[in-house]
Image (cartoon, coloured by chain):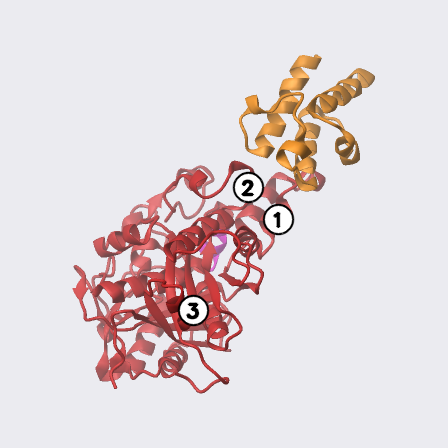
Chain colours: A red, B orange
Amino acid sequence: MSERGGRRHRVAITGLGLKAPGGLTVDEAMEALLSGKSAAETLPHLVEARSPVTFACRVPDFELSSYLGPREWRQMDRSAVLMAAATADAVRSAGLAETGQEDMGVAVGTGMAGLDVAAEVAPAHVDDPAGMPTYTVLRIMANSAAARVGLRLGAKKSCLTYATACASGATAIGESMEKIRSGELERVVAGGVDSALSPLVLGAFFRVGAVSRRNDDPGAASRPFDRDRDGFVMGEGAAMMVMERWESAEARGATILGEALGYASTSDAHHVVAPVQDGSSAAACMRLALADAGLAPAGIGHVNAHGTATVLNDRAEARGIAACFGDDMPPVTASKGVTGHLVGGAGAFEAVMGLVCAARGLVPPVANLGGGPDADLLDLVTGGPRRIPPAPVLSNSFGFGGHNACLVLAPAAWDRRP
Amino acid sequence: MDRSELSVLVRTKIASVMGVAETEVTEQTDLREEYQVDSLELMEIGARLESALGVRIKVDALLEMENVGDAVDALHRLSLERA
């Protein structure tokens, strides 16, 4: 345990929930990851709008009425709806009530909050600003998802929204973990979300050359660390985890799924979108997270890489992982080959699924990975899942802006060796 | 638009904002009593009726009404004045 702060509490993870491409539950998402098949598909609304990119990874349709009444969801943006559903799943799986959680904190990471609403509403009201829907403000505000979650839970402790672009979900989990360690919070639900599959948003990412242009073969487009990668595939989705002070979780007889062991947050201060190419900045963040967890590189069972399938991220990250782990290279996977990039939801989804993989002792293969110079630096899992003993996962997240967040999470079955 | 057509329109818009079936909203429905309608929702109902009818509706006027039938009456008077 780190030396920061005074008294430090252990952090138990007691609930997980998600709504993601390929999976509406943790079990479905695990199956999708193990299949190694991309969830990307051509989306008719993108084709119709003549979007330069016509595919993405959608969250499958689900029955909203098991989470929200129609009166409520009609006021909400899709990000808030996905977040409300993922939160309900996480809270239910923790064995907690979905209302009256006065002592609970809420933390939501989002990179593009409100962007889908802006992209939908603005073009229709350029000449008629006064005619905008009454609910525009509540759907467009950056804290919409966090506010809805807090309202629904009756959570009266800190309710915060974190923005570190593609690292936002991991940042929200890491910062919340710190609040439990320090004693500020006893219980928190934390994670991330984004949903912006509009042609305007895809056009913007197309313009910076960040997204794959493989319109003719969506399933092969998201190829983390592969030599033929050409950008990330836009996804959407939400993932949340319930974290609690260890003694509180034990006292209420909760099933403890794992422990949040380590977290580090750093910035490159290098370039607004390009990572430091030698991987030194990524490696530094990973090392800090390992140190915070009190682990040597050999203590990590597998790495869930950020692995966006952009040329620059994967090159820098591969070098960073290689530098951090040296001869103790653990198996590495990258979920975005299957799910695409959930942006603000990505770091949370990968933390949740990284823990599930660590607990089940299975590292999923990286979708669409043939090989290449960056892949050669790592022990990437390909073909099928690899069995590993229960051990902590390192989950990496690196956002535009040069924001880095690394999390170390241990499954319940793992024993810290003396 | 005669009064009965107007009534259907008003009840449809209200039902859509309240997230209930159209048959659940009658002219006797009291939105505050039965749905605890808030001012945002009233504004949204007003906005939807404004764009459907091409008239300006004051939220204050909506707030003063006892039930849905009162709103239909008021809008009906408005349309007669305009005719």
Q: Distance between the residues labelled 1 and 2?
A: 12 Å
Task: Tell whether label 2 touches label 3 (CB within 8 Å).
Answer: no
Residue designated by label 1: A138
Instruction: Name the quadrant containing residue A96.
Output: bottom left
Task: Tell whether label 2 touches label 1 (CB within 8 Å).
Answer: no
Instruction: Name the quadrant containing residue B61.
Output: top right
Residue A308 visible in the displayed image: no
Left or right: residue A239 versus residue A367 is right
Residue designated by label 2: A72
Q: Where is residue A121? Give x, y as percent.
A: 59, 42
Q: Which mark is first along the chain, 2 or 3? A: 2
- Residue sitting at 77 percent across and 18 percent down? B79
**Residues at discs 3 and 1 both on one chain:** yes
Overall secondary structure of the magenta section: helix
- Residue sitting at 77 percent across and 22 percent down? B74
Residue designated by label 3: A248
Query: Image height check: is A366 above or below A292?
Result: above
Q: Helix, strand or loop at disc 3? A: helix
Q: What residue type is labelled 1?
A: Leu
Q: Where is residue A268? Give x, y as percent.
A: 47, 77
Q: Which of A398 and A418 is in front in this view?
A: A418
Q: Helix, strand or loop at disc 2? A: helix
Q: What residue type is labelled 2?
A: Glu
Q: How crowded is mark 2: few (under 14 residues within 10 Å), some or many (20 or more)?
A: few
Q: Residues within 10 Å of mark 3 (few under 14, many from 20)?
A: some
Left or right: residue A2 versus residue A28 is right
Q: Over which residues does the magenta segment extend?
A: A201-208
Q: How far apart are marks 3 and 1 (CA)?
A: 35 Å
Indicate the chain on which mark 1 is placed: A
